[in-house]
Amino acid sequence: MAKQRLSVVVTRRLPEVVEARLAELFDVKLRESDTAMTRQELQQAVKECDVLVPTITDQIDNALISQASGRLKLIANYGAGVDHIDTETARQQGIMVSNTPGVVTEDTADMTMALLLAMTRRMPEGIAKMQNSEWEGWSPTALLGGRISGRRLGILGMGRIGQAVARRANAFGMQVHYHNRRRLRGETEEELKATYWESLDQMVARMDVISINCPHTPSTFHLMNARRLKLLKPDAVIVNTSRGEVIDENALTRMLRAGEIKGAALDVYERGAEINPRLRELDNVVLLPHMGSATVEGRIEMGEKVIINIKTFDDGHRPPDQVVPSML
């Protein structure tokens, strides 16, 4: 007798090749429109499937998980971050959670450097002049930015992405510094030419550029709060390609408006797509719509990891990328 196929619900549109493979392997319900599920749709989904494949736009909280039927056994997240999933409640309900670590490392590090360069070399202003037909020719004093070679880069969070940023920064001639929950091994520090700071306050006060590359957890929420932001040098730049909640966005906006920080380049925001309108108005910011992992290759690899996690679970084994609350 043939084994019954797992019932899988996918909450967002995924690359076609990923959806096709999911349909080959499982009894899958795919999303027809590229919009986030409503709360009611999520509630229905957790009641009818064996495996839920959510993304960062879905809040899989205590109340939602508590409504799941005994059928739901795996939440196979499409993405590395799981701060939108109540992993502890899932564990208590006997539901495994998996994610897709490592896939977005190089793409996000590339975007970090792109934002750093865009901010320090005033690229958005140059693009705007060209698009608005305002450029009247080269001038020795027009749109003068800053050279990044020799500048101090302070990396907040030295995991996979932070280390990838450090390698790129070294190639640009920057001085690499970092703060992390745990200090790296000596040979890794030597390879990355990275200087460790036990005190985050002391590090941020001395850097020319701060790059946020740590996850959002209860301990990192508003890690860059108003008090710590005030420690930054007036000519410092802050770049965030990690999670918006790590920075107090209102405090950052106030300081940027007052000229107390030179600039910010952001790909993520504290309240998702609800960006502070005062932040949008500023000339000393570069804002992107969460594009850090947006490469065709990365999104397909992410889907492949989801499929491996589900298939391994279906075969009676623990998903290779299972998330355990104590890991966070």
Image (cartoon, helix red, strand yellow):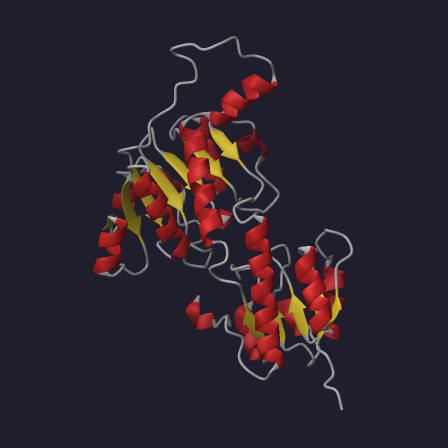
Quadrant containing the N terminus in the rendered view: bottom right
Quadrant containing the C terminus in the rendered view: bottom left
Q: How many labels does the image show?
A: 0
Closest to the observer, 112 or 254: 112
Q: Which residue lies furthest to the right in this view?
A: 32
Image x and y of residue 244, in percent: 50, 47
Find residue 149 and report its image quarter. top left
Image x and y of residue 229, in percent: 37, 39
Identify the residue at horizontal 55%, vertical 17% (top origin).
129
Find residue 208 and report its image quarter. top left
- Left or right: 328 as drawn, with respect to 195: right
Closest to the observer, 83 or 119: 119
Find residue 315 and report its image quarter. bottom right
- Left or right: 264 as drawn, with respect to 181: right
Evaluate whether residue 37 shows in this view: yes
Q: Which residue lies furthest to the bottom in this view?
A: 1
Image x and y of residue 265, in percent: 46, 36
- Left or right: 222 as drawn, with respect to 194: right
Image x and y of residue 311, in percent: 61, 75
Q: In this view, does 192 lie above or below 19?
A: above
Identify the residue at horizontal 67%, vertical 56% (top origin).
14
Q: Is residue 174 above or below residue 13?
A: above
Identify the residue at horizontal 70%, vertical 61% (top origin).
19
Q: Is residue 257 above or below residue 269?
A: above
Closest to the observer, 204 or 164: 164
Identify the residue at horizontal 49%, vertical 39% (top origin).
266
- Left or right: 1 as drawn, with respect to 315: right
Evaluate whether residue 255 shows in this view: no
